[in-house]
């Protein structure tokens, strides 16, 4: 893959050479940006952290960027991009398992087998414009974490990056862990660091997680007023199954589950008794138990481990995350 050294700032109608191409659906294609980030990680030999990688991609002429790295093919490839946008794409790539925090320190970034496969055969990666916009709570949380890092560094008389790397701060901002156990999954946060300031992290994150939840709920409340959602609600209230709703509306089962989940969150329907009455009790219990025990659970992995169909897995995940997160697991009859 060639570096996109002529990257344009704004997505335009599809033309050869655009880094983020805008399709008729208004989705943006971040294939080329993703490729540039992957190639930079490879050229840096999986040895650099997020801040360094971002500065190479943006063509920053600072003294701590090595001279040989200023000659890399991807140096300045994303010179027109805001750092927040690159951070968002990096989080997306980690979630997609194209890159990963290093197993040794958690502070540097490595390419994965999936990332190398993407470089060999790039594919379109479509995201909504809103996905790439930095949310108010994201920026606010990141700033508070920087302030905490600075204060601890001054107190301990050590460099700020040794307290928390930029990658650690970014994953905290993105994942917003809710407890000490979830903090342990954040790259670069060692047990001594969690003992030192883990509770301070959780206290800061808590208020911003609530802000994110409220903003998401307000958005969903606007969305579910649409005719499509209200028709799905009416079919559900008529006792139609997910498959029947999907067939009537000409949409996928997965889409129906997403609709019903949002309708539940806004109080338009109550999915708890429906799920408990209609799903296979043993499969629901096994799936819910799996999702409660696994950090950052993925449907594909759950399907491979449990042998349970994707519709049931989606509903089980919805059950423990949105519908009854504090309730005991449903005991199979």
Image (cartoon, helix red, strand yellow):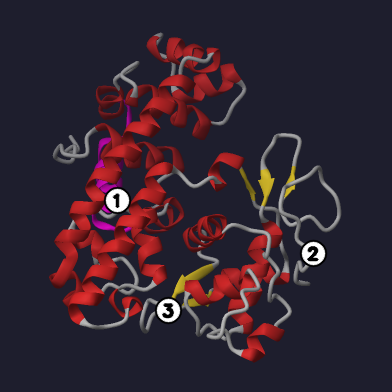
Which residue shows up at 17% across the image and 60% down it? 200
Label 1 or label 3, whichever lies nearer to me, is: 3
Residue 67 rendering spot, x and y as whole percentages:
64, 90
Categorize mark 3 by other alpha carbons within 10 Å: few (<14), some (14-19), many (20+). some
- Circle nearer the N terminus (3, 2): 2
Circle number at residue 51? none
- Whole-Å distance between the Cαs marked 1 and 3? 25 Å
Q: Quadrant of residue 279?
A: top left
- Circle nearer the N terminus (1, 3): 3
Give the answer, above or below, for where 6 lies relative to 204: below
Residue 143 rendering spot, x and y as whole percentages:
35, 56
**Helix, strand or loop at disc 3?**
loop
Which residue shows up at 71% across the image and 61% down it? 32
Query: Horizontally, is 322 left or right of 300 in the view?
Result: left
- Circle nearer the N terminus (2, 1): 2
Question: Which quadrant: the N terminus?
Answer: bottom right
In the rendered structure, which segment of residues is drawn in magenta? 278-296
Magenta segment, principal secondary structure? helix
Query: Horizontally, is 23 left or right of 153 in the view?
Result: right
Residue bearing mark 2: 6
Choose between 274 and 193: the one closer to the eye.
193
The answer to whether any part of residue 297 appears in the image is no
Give the answer, above or below, for where 38 lies relative to 46: above
Count of picture labels: 3
**Helix, strand or loop at disc 1?**
helix
Choose between 260 and 65: the one closer to the eye.
65
**Helix, strand or loop at disc 2?**
loop
Label 3 or label 2, whichever lies nearer to me, is: 2
Q: Quadrant of residue 118?
A: bottom right
């Amino acid at each position: 893959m060639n570096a996109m050294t002529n990257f344009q700032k704004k997505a335009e109608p599809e033309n050869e050479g655009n880094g983020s191409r805008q399709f008729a659906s208004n989705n943006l294609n971040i294939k080329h940006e993703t490729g540039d980030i992957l190639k930079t990680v490879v050229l840096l030999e999986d040895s650099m952290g997020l801040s360094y990688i971002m500065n190479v991609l943006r063509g920053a002429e600072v003294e701590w960027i090595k001279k040989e790295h200023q000659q890399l093919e991807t140096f300045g490839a994303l010179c027109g991009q805001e750092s927040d946008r690159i951070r968002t794409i990096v989080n997306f790539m980690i979630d997609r398992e194209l890159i990963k925090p290093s197993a040794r320190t958690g502070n540097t970034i490595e390419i994965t087998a999936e990332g190398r496969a993407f470089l060999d055969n790039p594919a379109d990666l479509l995201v909504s414009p809103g996905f790439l916009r930095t949310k108010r709570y994201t920026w606010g949380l990141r700033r508070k974490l920087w302030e905490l890092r600075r204060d601890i560094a001054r107190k301990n008389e050590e460099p700020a990056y040794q307290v928390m790397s930029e990658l650690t701060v970014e994953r905290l901002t993105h994942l917003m862990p809710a407890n000490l156990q979830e903090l342990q999954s954040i790259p670069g946060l060692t047990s001594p660091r969690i003992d030192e300031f883990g509770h301070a992290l959780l206290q800061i994150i808590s208020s911003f997680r609530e802000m994110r939840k409220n903003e998401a709920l307000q958005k969903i409340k606007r969305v579910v007023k649409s005719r499509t959602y209200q028709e799905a609600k009416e079919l559900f209230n008529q006792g139609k199954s997910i498959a029947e709703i999907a067939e009537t509306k000409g949409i996928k089962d997965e889409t129906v589950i997403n609709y019903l989940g949002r309708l539940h969150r806004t109080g338009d329907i109550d999915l708890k008794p429906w799920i408990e009455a209609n799903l296979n009790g043993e499969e629901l219990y096994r799936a819910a138990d799996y999702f409660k025990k696994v950090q950052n659970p993925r449907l594909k992995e759950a399907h491979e481990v449990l042998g349970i169909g994707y519709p049931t897995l989606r509903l089980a995940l919805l059950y423990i995350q949105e519908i009854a997160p504090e309730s005991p697991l449903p005991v199979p009859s």
